[in-house]
Image: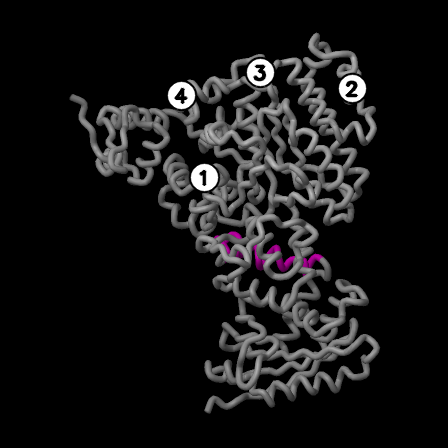
Amino acid sequence: MEKYIGTKEAAALLNLSMRRVVGLCQAGEFQGAVQKNKRWQIPVESVRDLASKRNTVLDKQELRPCAVGNTSYVDVSSDCYYVDKTLLVKELIDDRSMVTLFTRPRRFGKTLAINMLKTYFEISDRDTSVYFQDKAIWQCGKRYQEQQGRYPVIFLTFKDIKYDTWEDCQEAIRIILCDEYRRHTELASSTYLDDVDKEYYRRMSQGALSNVEYSRALLNLTHMLRRHYHERVVILIDEYDTPIQQGYLKGYYDEVISFMRILFSGGLKDNEDLAFGVLTGILRISKENLFSGLNNLVVNTVLDDKYSTYFGFTEDEVLAMAEYYGRSDRITEIREWYDGYRFGDTEIFNPWSVSSYFYNDCMPKNFWVNTSDNRILQEIMHQLTPEVADELLGLMQGKHISSQIDPEMIYPKISDGSDAIFSFLLLAGYLTIDTQPQESELGTYAELRLPNKEIQRVYTSEILSWLRDTTGANTVASVQKALYTNDPKRLEMALRTFMMNCISSFDGAAEGFYHGMTLGLTASLSSYYKVSSNRESGEGRYDLQLEPLIKTFPGIIMEFKAASASEKEKLPNLADEALQQIEDRAYKTEMKERGISNIVSYGIAFAGKEVCVKIEKRNVSNG
């Protein structure tokens, strides 16, 4: 009679964690394992077989390299360490959704997943099932195996469409469409296509179509492939929103939305030749803007539990990876740097960063931030208000914030208030959900936080880098030096230089703008000061406070005043009024109660791009 043991005994025999053994059970690695009353029972012989196999793989062969930057499923699954995500195929087949959009942060495995789907479903003149026979999907049975290699596939990726003008962007999209037509050379001589189809194919291959004809490219290609193969078509589109983001940044948003709406609707809306479609991107562009009338679209975001394990690495997957490379002792470090994301109810690690960590001999650093430009973040920072900047600083200091979440974010509304900004930062991977979102009559609310050390450093090195990029490092350094040395003239000059370079003539309309601007500049001091704004102290609310983290540094209180650009002569008096307000309302009370006696008051007055800074240095009594 076959003997069974539990996961605890199996873990001891294999020198694995119980969690890892459960993951192996779920992945079908133990032949004959069964689950009873939520507990796994594993045949002893199956455990011994796996132990023998592990010794063979790990002791007698070289370890597979950790793939970084390779998005070819065939290459990665054959030659590299591959985290098996093939059960995504099963989920899509079981769901029977006509069009599914997955929105996830960049570098979270979207392109590799799309390429895996292409390899699985696409008709090929070679046997591509060999790339799946040792994967989880093949253990799901005949129903799913029969779908392998069955469909003609249209595969488009827009991830590299980052051009400054609509004309160049449109030309790049045309080239991508032409290349996809040329990939299906079987259509050129197909006996199932009529002369009209063949003429369209010929002209498309030569890039000789009008804009209207190009906008029907998806629809026409599905028709041709359906006629040729007598099988419905799968459409896979990777990073669909990259040209849309670029259009927003470069001023051709309306043009790209208009073109893409017609292109996508033709292929994905009410198309009888469509088997199903899958799109990936960072944001969902709402139906009113792009997917107008596409009522068969199912959207899956970081808020959804369904599909939550297929983009990014789960804890079990990272534990297995660390064990494979013999670095289980580094798990705590990996968690601190690259864990902390929450997709639905699933804890997720950043897959790009974890892979890069193992590839780079387990040296922790910021890998993810360097994978693409962050101009959209710079756009947000240029709209910085005191309230948003204050909450960003709180996040950098380990605090949580509560925000309404809008999963249907569109690019033109990214900077429309703090909720829009934090929704974007969540969807783009710069924040994560701390607790399950709560639904109310007013919308979806959630507690947000920074995921990990890597992202914390992004906020100090990348989100605030727009200051250095637009003004040069000298401006930020001048602000720092002026505050260290209590030099009002140096600070005045640094602020004036920043405004001359960064703001237009109409930006200086309200005190709040200058408040947010100065708060953003001083945020670079967060390693030395606890920076806070609009907090109660004494008999009122100070504008900005820098509480020293190093005892030898002075405490700083700032109060701001603003006048119209035509009232520059009022600046000295306004700066004096600001200093007097600090004294009259006892803004120094909070720092005094914490034992800080060396406190410097700054009265700062703005008018247009002009500024006047006055300071008052005084040791205060703690009595």
Span colored in magenta:
448-469
Would residue 332 be found to the left or right of residue 541 on screen?
A: left
Mark 3 nearby-residue class (10 Å; few <14, some 14–19, many ≥20): few
Q: Report the amino acid beneath label 3.
A: Ser
Q: Which residue is mark 3?
A: 124
Q: Report the amino acid beneath label 1.
A: Thr
x, y (%) of residue 198?
76, 14
Q: Report the amino acid beneath label 4.
A: Gly
Residue 453 within the segment the image draws in magenta: yes
Indicate which disc, 3 or 1, sits on the residue closer to the N terminus. Answer: 3
Residue at 53% x, 24% y: name it. 74
Disc 1, SS: loop
Q: Which residue is mark 1?
A: 309
Residue 137: quadrant of the picture:
top left
**From the viewer's perspective, is the residue at label 1 or at label 4 nearer?**
4
Disc 2, SS: helix
x, y (%) of residue 167?
81, 38
Indicate which disc, 2 or 1, sits on the residue closer to the N terminus. Answer: 2
Residue 560 vs 25, above or below: the answer is below
Q: Which residue is mark 4?
A: 141
Q: Report the amino acid beneath label 2.
A: Tyr
Disc 4, SS: loop
Q: Which mark is residue 200?
A: 2
Q: Which mark is residue 240?
A: none
